[in-house]
Amino acid sequence: MSDALLSTRELHVHFEGRGGAPARAVDGVDLEVRRGEVLALVGESGCGKTTLARSIMGLERPAAGEISFEGEPLRYDGRFLRSYRSKVQMVFQDPMGALNPRQSVYEAVAEGLRIQKVPGDEATRVAEALSRAGLRPPERFVHLYPYELSGGQRQRVVIAGAMVLNPSLLVADEPVSSLDASVRGEILKLMLELVRDAGVTILVVTHDLGLAWNIADRIAVMYLGRIVEEGPAEELLSNPRHPYTRALLSVVPEVEEMEQLILQGEAPDPTRIPAGCRFHPRCPLVASGEAARLGIEERCRTEDLGLEPVAPDHSAACHAL
Amino acid sequence: MAVTTSLLSVRDLHVTYRTQGGSVPAVRGVSFDLAPGETLGLAGESGCGKSTIAGALLRVLPRGTEVTGEVLLDGEDVLAMKPGRLRAVRWNEMSIVFQGALHALNPVQSVGDQIAEAIKLHRTSPDSASRIATLLETVGIPARRAGDFPHQLSGGQRQRVLIALALACNPRILIADEPTTALDVMVQAQVLELLERLQRELALSMIFITHDLSTLSYVCQRTAVMYAGRIVEAGVAEEVFARPAHPYTAALAAAFPLIGDHTHRMNPSGLGGDPPDPRAIPSGCPFHPRCAVVTPECPEVDVELWPAGDDRRAACIHVLDGTRP
Amino acid sequence: MSTIAWQRRGRAARKTWSQYRRDREGMAGLVVLAVFVIVAIFASVFADHDQLNPVNTTGNPVWAPPTEVPPLGTDSLGRPIWDQLVYGSQVSLLVGVAATLIAVIIGTVVGVVGGFFGGWTDSVLSRLSEWFLVIPFIPLAIVLAAILGPSLQNIILVIGVTSWPVTARLVRAQVLTVKQRLFVERSRALGAKNAHIMGRHILPNVTPLVIANATLTVPVAILSETTLAFLGLGDPLRVSWGSMLEEAFSAGALGREAWWWYLPPGLCVIAVVLAFTLVGRALETIIDPRLRAGWRG
C-alpha cells in the first residue's frame, strides 16, 4: 500500500527470560502506519506496545520479521540507522528523565542537529523548533535547565528536540501520562497541530482509551504481544468486536453506557503465553459459557489465530467473529 | 451538614512546611465534613495540597511542620491529642492506603509479616495468623500468599496488600491516597470494585484522594476540588463534574474526554500555564492567571466558598453574579 | 550563546563556593591545605636548601632540641628538622597529587569503558580491578619498587598503578546508573554514536564523583608514599616526611627521646591527610545533592 509510511511484517521481539523461556514481548505483529494519520497503539502494561515502539525506532532488534519504512526494510548498520533516525523520532513518557539535567534547553534541542550534522544555522533551527513546540518566545527558554521548567514545558522541549530534525514519523510513548491532567490537553493539541502543519505522522502508544478518542484516527489494541483488534477510532470505540477491547472499554470510567466487564486476575507474563487464543483464560466468552454455546470453545483453547476483517478497514482476532 | 452527624470534621486546616528555602503553605484553610458511611473525594493536581491533608489527619507530617485548625473525630480534636491517645486513634480509627508502588512495602519482609507488624503495633490481637488470612481473603488475595515478598506480587496485588494493611485494625475511616494511580485500567477497575465492596460490607467511611476525576465520580458520593491549597468547589460528585461551577473544575473535567462524546473528538482541551508554586500564590483568586473567564475584579477579591446551587459551593465570584454555573 | 554558557558556569561555580563555605570542617581543611601548599611552593622562602646536605651542617650541633636550635632542632647529622620538614612537604604533596592523577585517569578510563560496553570487556576489566584490589599493597609496592628502582617517578608510578581500582569501581557503578537513564536512550534515538554518548552524557555525570573521589585519594597516596619511604623504598636523593621518619627510627631517635625529629613529620602527615579528607567530604556532600537536584519536577 503506497500510503503506508511504516509497516511491520510478522515482527517478533524476544527478551531473555529468567531460567530459560524467552519473554515474547512482540509475538507476530503486522502493523501499518499510514501517512498523515495518528495511530494509537493501545494496551495495558506488559502487552508489548512499548517494545514495539522501540523496535520501530531501531532501539531493539527483532528476533524475526521485518520493519519497513517508506517501503525499504530496516537495516541495523550504523550508517542506515543514523539516517533513519533523521526521519523517525521519539517522544518519551518521562520528560524529566529524558532530558540530561546538565544540559540547557538549547543544548537538548540542538543535540539532534549536532549528531546528524545538519548544515545551516543551528541557533535559528533551535529557536524555530522551540517556537513550533509552543515555547514562545524561544529566547526566554534557551538558557534554562530542566529543573527550572514545569512538566508540560519539559515535554515541549523533548518534542522540539524531536521535531527539529523534521521527521516524517513521530513515535510518542505515553507522551502525557506523567503530566498533570489539566496540562495534557495542551500537549495533545500540540501534537494534532504538528500533524496538520508539519505533516508529521504520529504513532502514539498509550493505555488511555480516552486519549485515543481525543486524537487518534485509527486504533490498534494489543494484548500479550499481538494486535487483537484494529480499525478506525470512532468505529472501534463505539462498536468493539474483540472481547478484550469490549472489556477494556467497559471499565473505562468515561464510558457509562456499557455494563462493566471486569476481567479476573492480570495478564500472564510474556514468558508463559497461553496456547490457542492467548486471551482465552480470561475471556468473558469462555468464562460465561458463551464460547461453548457457539461451539468454538475447543478452538479458543487450542487454535491460535490472527486478525480477520470484520468490517471495512476493521479487523479483530477472535474465533467468535 | 449538621456538625453532630459528622464522623470527621475538619475546620480551617492550615499546613505550612518549613524548608531551607522558607515556609511553604501547602494547605491554606480547608474545611470539610465526612458523614458515617460516606465516601468523600478530594480532587486536585500536583501541588494542590491534597496529599498533605492525608498526612495532617493522621499527624504523620515531618517534624516542624506547622499545622493549625481542628480535626474533630467524633468531636475530639486529633491535632490536640496526646501521644498515647493519638496512637490509639492511628490505624484503629483512621488509616491510610498509599499508592501501591514497589517501595511502599518493605522489600525484605513478607507481606504477611508486614500485616502482622501493623496488628502488633496498634493493638494486641489474640490470633494474628488467622486475622492475616482473613484480611488477605477480604482483599482478594489467596491466604497462602502471605509468605510472598512484595516483588513476587503484581502491581494490583501490592495495592490490595496495602488495603489489607490499612484494614488491619478495623478502622472506621480509610484514607486512600491515589490508590489507583499507576495501575492499568483493568486492575484499577478491580481495585475500585474492591473498595466499593469494602465500603458497603464494612460500613467504612472513606476519603478518596486522586487527580483522576473519572475514577472519583465512580466511587465517591461527594467531592471537594482543590487548587493552590484551598477547596475551590464542593458538592455531590456526579453533579460537580457534569455541571461544574468553578472554571478550574470545568477545565479539569474537560481533560478527561468522554468516549462517544463528539465534542471531545479531535479536540483536546487543556489548561495553559502551570499550577502555582505554593511560595508564590497569585493575589485574589489564585486561579485567575489561567482562567478562561477572568474579569478585572478577580485578582482583587479574596474568594470564599460561596453557595452555587443546590448542595454546591464554589470559590468563584461569578457564582455570585449568576453567570456560573 | 557560549558567553552565556560561561556565565552560567561562573554562576554555578560561585554557588558551589558559597555552599562550600558553609561547611566549617571543609573550610578548616581548605585553610590547612592552603598553608601546606604555599609552604611547599615557596619552600625556598621558608627554609634553607643547603642545610639539607650533611656536608654543610658539620658545624651544627647534633641531636639538638628546639630550645637549642629553633625552630625544631637538628638530627643526628646536624641537619635542621625545620628545613627537612619544609622541603619534605614538596615530595609528599607532589607524590600525593601526581599519583592520584595517574590513579584517577586509569581508574576513570577503565570504569567508563567497562561500565559502558559491558559484556566481555567489562568482565575482563572487572577481574583486573579485583586482582589489584586483592593483592596487598605493601608487598606489591616493595616488589615493584625493587624492580623499577627507587626514584621519585617510580614511586609515583607504583602508587598510581596500585590505587586505580577503587576509582574504577566507583566510576563503573556510576556509569551503569547513568547508562540506563532515559536521556541516554533519547540520545541514541537521535542517532548518537557511542563516542558522543560517552563524551556528552556519561562523562559529565561521572566527573563530579571523580573529583570528590580524587580529593579523597590524595591522602591515601600520601600515606602510601610515607609508608614506602619509611620502609626505605623512597627516593634516596629527596627528603620526604616518610624518609625523615625512617632516618629518625634507624638513628635511634625513639630511644633518645628526640621527639623533635619524629613528631613533626608524623604530625604533618596526619594534618595533610585530615585536611584532604575534610575537603573531599565537603565536596561529596555538595556534589551528591546536586546530582539528584532536578530529579523531581
Image (tube, grey):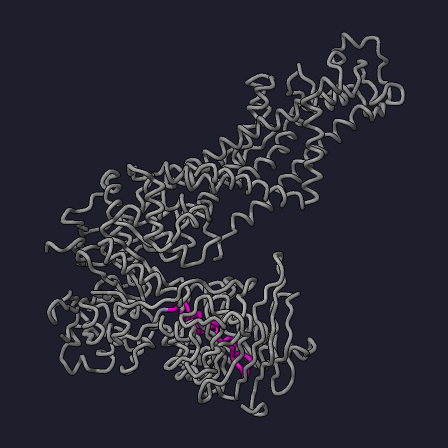
Verify whether residue B180 appears in magenta. yes
Q: Nearer the viewer, residue C107 or B307?
A: B307
Q: Is residue C64 left or right of residue A241?
A: right
Res A255 quadrant in image:
bottom left
Q: Is residue B261 above or below residue A100?
A: below
Residue lying farthest to the right in this orientation: C67
Looking at the rendered image, the quarter that the N terminus of chain C falls into is: top left
Q: Position of residue B62 (x, y in %)?
A: 62, 65
Q: Is residue C122 left or right of residue A208?
A: right
Res C89 quadrant in image:
top right
On the question of residue A19 being in view, the answer is no
Q: Is residue A144 left or right of residue A53?
A: right
Q: Position of residue C86 (x, y in %)?
A: 73, 22
On the question of residue C74 being in view, the answer is yes
Q: Nearer the viewer, residue C189 or C253?
A: C189
Q: Position of residue C236 (x, y in %)?
A: 66, 15
Q: Which residue is found at the position 53% from the left and 71% from the top?
A: B300
Verify whether residue B85 appears in magenta. no
Q: Position of residue B174 (x, y in %)?
A: 51, 79
Q: Is residue A107 left or right of residue B282?
A: left
Range shown magenta: B156-183
Q: Which residue is found at the position 16% from the left and 69% from the top?
A: A316
Total numbered circles? 0
Q: Which residue is found at the position 20% from the left and 55% from the top?
A: A11
Q: Is residue C143 above or below residue A293?
A: above
Q: Which residue is found at the position 51% from the left and 39% from the top?
A: C7
Residue lying farthest to the front in this orientation: B296
Q: Nearer the viewer, residue C196 or C98?
A: C196
